[in-house]
Image (tube, rainbow, N blue to C red):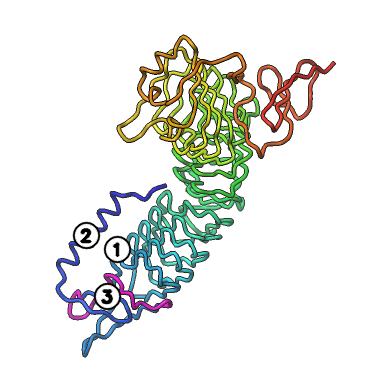
Amino acid sequence: MKRNTLRKLVFLFFLIASVAAQAQEFTVDGVIYCIDNSEEVWINGYTEDIPQHLIIPEIVNNGDASYHVTAINAGSFENCKELVSITIPNNIIELEGYTFEDCINLSSVTLPDKLIKIHGGAFMNCKNLTSITIPSSVTEIGTEAFWGTGLTSINIPNNVSSIIPGAFSGCRKLETIMVESGNKVYDSRNNCNAIIETESNKLITGCQNTIIPNGVTCIEQYAFCDCSNLNRIIIPSSVNNIMFAAFFNCYGLTSIQVESGNKVYDSRNNCNAIIETKTSSLILGCPTTIIPNSVKNIGTYAFANYSDITSISIPNSVKLIYYSAFSGCRSLQSIVLPQNLGLIANSAFTGCSGIKDVYCYAEDAPQTNITFYNHAFSESSYTEARLHVPASSIEKYRNASVWNEFKEIVALTDNDPTPTGVKHIHSDNMINKRYYSLDGKNYTKPQRGLNIIHQSNGTNKKLIMK
């Protein structure tokens, strides 16, 4: 997820305004201090002379004058690649936004015992920061505070009463999460390896070892974002709200299941996906997903960034493909689009640089809600991929926005792949054989009657069991 640009601009605005208002600065050990009054200074930046291992003093001297260090301004150490370790003095009670953002070599941080707030983006993208002790004095942790760090474990102290969604998202190596038992706002019930808001039963943050407890009703926005080592998800029957991008960029997923009895979501026909039951919208899939021939919509980011998906065949029931549904599937070579498809949103297939063939069975070219800078396909697709359409519709596609940008448009033939409703997502990493009934139901072994066998080389064959 990209940082909240507006929030950062606000921080920088106040930073610039503050600098303008201060007339006197001095530098000690590569740290730039601004005089606030006769007794206090705050930190406003650094120079190239900053040491790798920095201990910020509680009192800093400038000539004959001594000052208490009371604040570190927003973004003061941003992109400081020299910094390896830092100790922050007890005078500091708040870490402002993006203070240490992109300090990619920062691996050791000692926070002050009196710290109360860690604001948004404070340690964003500190990739070498694998552990940190949050002081018991802390009450608030802002959004993106630890986004993209190398943290492997998190311990939330008792006094923390506000954790903004996304605070620990993007921590790809995160294995364990624990909220101390005395916390009155959050918990990690049943050792679930997650942060849950106790009163609302909302899961705020998860990790690769999270087991979502039955009783959780909501999975918060970005709760598992960038959790690339998450392999399996089981959604309990109690969950009635999965918020936007809750599982974005979990590209290690191979197994997705919604427990029976859930009134909002399902994984019909053991499809390895999360489907919103009322709308028949597939909101999350993975490389082993079998899209049921009852799904009407493919949701935003549903299959985004799965690098091992090589082909997609979407069943005839699908009418809408939403924004970035398959974006970033860089190994994708073949796409089969159904005859009932009415709309492909912008960026649906952007970042899919390997596309060679697009087979579209719709008689009328599906609409595309593009912007001047954002198309449904990548530029390379228009120049390198071949678009196959019904012979009677070639001129329609040549005159339709977006579709007319394909350099080569040809007629479909009887030998081209079709939307069968059986084989939909193919990956070279899938198991060797999978067995299906005619309605797409998955079996672990052949059943009596007609079976369809899907093999890992992308071919299907029929098998009759007596």
Look at the numbered disc 2 and give the secondary structure of its residue.
helix
- The answer to whether residue 419 is left or right of residue 463 is left
Which residue is depicted at the point 50% across and 13% down? 390
Which residue is depicted at the point 52% across and 36% down? 354
Locate residue 323, reporting x and y percent: 42, 32
The reply to whether residue 264 is visible in this rendering is no
Q: Earlier in the sequence, mark 3 or mark 1?
A: 3
Measured Cα–Cα span from mark 3 to mark 2: 17 Å
Q: Residues within 10 Å of mark 2 (few under 14, many from 20)?
A: few
Residue 454 sits above or below residue 4 on the image: above
Q: Residues within 10 Å of mark 1 (few under 14, many from 20)?
A: many
Q: Which residue is mark 1?
A: 74
Q: Which residue is mark 2?
A: 14
Residue 159 sits above or below residue 425 on the image: below
**Amino acid type at image mark 2:** Phe
The question of residue 36 being in magenta is answered with: yes
Q: Which residue is mark 3?
A: 32
**Amino acid type at image mark 1:** Ala
Q: Nearer the viewer, mark 3 or mark 2?
A: 3
Look at the numbered disc 3 and give the secondary structure of its residue.
strand
Q: Earlier in the sequence, mark 3 or mark 2?
A: 2
Locate residue 55, reporting x and y percent: 39, 79
Look at the numbered disc 1 and give the secondary structure of its residue.
loop
| Front-lying residue, 432 or 21 | 432
- Numbered range of the magenta stretch: 35-53
**Amino acid type at image mark 3:** Ile
Residue furthest to the bottom in view is 64
**Quarter that holds the C terminus:** top right
| Front-lying residue, 453 or 44 | 453
Disc assigned to residue 423: none
Mark 2 and 1 residues: CB-CB less than 8 Å, in contact? yes
